[in-house]
Amino acid sequence: MSAPAAVPPCVGLSVVELAAGTSDLGLGPAGGVPGMVLADLGASVVRVVGAAAMPIDRDVPWGRAWHRDKRVIATDDRDEVSALLRDADVALVYGPEALVERRGLGHRDLRVSNPSLVYARCRPGRTARGTVTDFGLLVEAAAGLCTQLAGHRPGPIFVDARASGIGTASLLTVSVLALLRHRARTGVGGWAETSLYDGMLATLGCMIGRSERAAPEIEGYWEKGSTFPDFLYGCADGELIQVWVGGKGMYRSIIEVLGDEPSADGYYTDQMTGRLGERAARWRSFFATRPRDDWIRRLREAGVACEPVFGPGEVLADPHLAEIGLAVARADGSHRDVVVGSPISIRPLGRTPRDESRPPPPDGTGAGLLNGLRVLDFSAFVAGPLAAEILADLGADVVKVEPPGGEAMRAAAYAVAACQRGKRSVALDIGAPEARPVVERLLAWADVVLHNFRVGVSERLGIDEETVARLNPHAVYCHATAFGTTGPRARFPANDALMQAVTGFERALGGAGNDPLAATWIPIDMSGGWVAATGVLAGLYARAAGGGGQRVATSLVGSGMLLQSGVFQRDGEIVRGPELDPGQTGYGPGYRIYECGDGGWFALVLPDRAAWLRLAALPEASSLPAIYAPLRGGAADAVARQAESVLEAAFRTAPAAEWVGRLRGLGLLAELIEPLDRDGFRRAILDDPVNRRLGRVVSYETTDWGRFEQIGPLVRCGPMAGGGPRLMLPGIGEHTVEVLSELGLGRAEIDALLAARVARQMEDIASPAEHEEAQRT
């Protein structure tokens, strides 16, 4: 029998996106992607903007992609906006309080006339340093992100990673879908609140931590940063290739392909001793001997993961992406566009009729939006585990199932810290015949089954979609893949670095004409986790609305493309909009960072002509052109470049702090960039009293590290308050006996599994040497 027809889960929902007084450039993906994703999931979206567009957006084309399926209304009429919101299911609200709360458009005002409204608010972010206006550059400059990546010159750089924008987009979308599910069950609406600062933190979970007594190599990562090689190589034809050697057998295979000396100790030991870095540097001369296509063929034949390094938007030409719906052709008047499609696919679970006689058990009624929901997490590495952690942060009971020696990323403490909080760990060899009855009980127990195995592996392990549909037809089954579940690249391996290369992220970060630059905080893996969580919550909403079990598919490549989703093709040409300059300072005179006379730097945003003229009134900037040209690349490109030269010279006449004071005195948007090393950056986040008060930072006891501090749960939403997730990091198999007992296994059955080493509890876990041997085999 064929699969049941897929109906988008958000069909029939009315979404109002209130964005008056905001900027596509400033908010980035935060201001357009949540509405775009909801529209892709079937909702009807109305975007309300002011009668006059933000002038700095004049040459920013990203909105053509983000707002493609929205009805756009330009109005300043409060009554007209209020009428739209009274009838809406969802409100996505941006902008300063003067344009929102003071006009009676806040949640407290609207819930009186529309108590079922799901209201998600993005407001200017506040820390102990003060409130920062909603421009991603200002937020990241004030936080110090500009200092955390070594660029092509000394000093801070404009980090073109869309960190604050994509993180905020993720927080908003996750919050909305969690609240919609709650409303489907209770009839009551709710609220969510976030900011660009929260969004930036949402991408940095693997980067920020501090422990009381972790091993030096663990604490050293959080204090000083990663020393891991980037495996980015130039080839004989001048093209670049990104390689990954961390998958099973890949290290040995690449050594054989390159003809390098064999490794006596293996990948993990070489990584810890520094020999991996020595090899990575030596391989530069190896790759320079052959063209890229030759290397890609040879490495893929040997099972080594690799990808070409593309610029933003180039991957849209890949036929595989069109086949899986990530590159979508659309007509726009006389133009033919290709835009980034939805990274989330949802359809009814299974290929046979569901057993509707077995209703799903009711969720709990505690404080968390997902209280009582049961999640079975088979995933490893980062994207899958992060998705499950987000569900745990929302109150779900998450059981992580990992091999008896621990999942592969246990060797990378940062990933455990960032992605395993709040879960219970069951150490179980799910491929062993003795484990099969336990696996089936777990699958029948769960509301959500999540994994990120490569395509084909779940069938071999017996946790595939068909099996889950048979055992638990009301489950939401999520497969977070690399390149999608179908198509010619479906079985290709991938990781964050490969996706940074192929989606154009590394090229964008490097700046025009420069070598690519890789971000070290695995931003695409993090994005993948948020996208998978979004997909699960959409599936849970569909189930709560009467749709039965759901099958959700997301992909790492789709998550990576979401960061560049404002880039599109038009009539065969890539439309990118503002691009980073070779000096890695920004997009133009009105949106960039400047070096001052003392060697200090600050960020400046000139959102309109009035700000431009106030700056030009200063004696040092009197030769600033009269034409408002804040960005390079538009019709006034020559004027913009002239203006940059004028301002660069002007700002070298005094120290950075003095300039920031003068500019703020004129009402201009400027943020000083403090010279923070990695430790200073993490301290600025972890020790900020506002962050601690809002729960952006949490502190709790761990078995191995003592007191541990990290970025906490960032989803802030209600209607109810209190509760919160369990703050703990599970040891390998810490909860094996507990969970197996809950499943109904007797003590004799559990002891037999432990004796056969099919299952383990925490005190019976292998030594580090045994763990590495288990990973090798």
Image (spheres, rainbow, N blue to C red):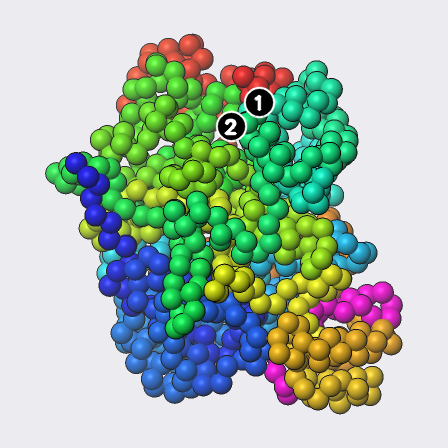
Residue at image coords 71%, 22%: 259
Query: Which residues are the magenta region?
Result: 590-610
Using the image, determine if residue 278 lies above or below residue 641.
above
- Give the SS element for disc 1: loop
Q: Which residue is mark 1?
A: 249
Amino acid identity at mark 2: Glu
Q: In which quadrant is the N terminus drawn?
A: top left
* Crowd tier of the residue under label 1, counting other residues whose Cα lies within 10 Å: few below 14, some 14–19, many 20 or above: some
Q: Residue at x 43, y 45 (%)?
A: 320
Q: Residue at the spot x=75%, y=51% of the render?
A: 150
Residue behind mark 2: 407
Residue type at mark 1 is Gly
Residue nearest the observer in this picture, 298 or 676? 298
Q: Is residue 16 above or below residue 272?
A: below
Q: What count of labels does the image hold? A: 2
Whole-angstrom CA distance, mark 2 to mark 1, is 16 Å
| Depth check, front residue: 752 or 724 | 752
Whole-percent x, y for residue 267 in the image: 65, 24
x and y percentages locating residue 636 in the rendered image? 65, 80
Circles 2 and 1, Cβ within 8 Å, touching? The answer is no
Inspect this view and state whether residue 20 appears: yes
Could you say where residue 722 lies in the image, as x and y percent from the top left? Answer: 42, 54
Q: Is residue 318 left or right of residue 449?
A: right
What secondary structure is found at the residue carrying circle 2? loop
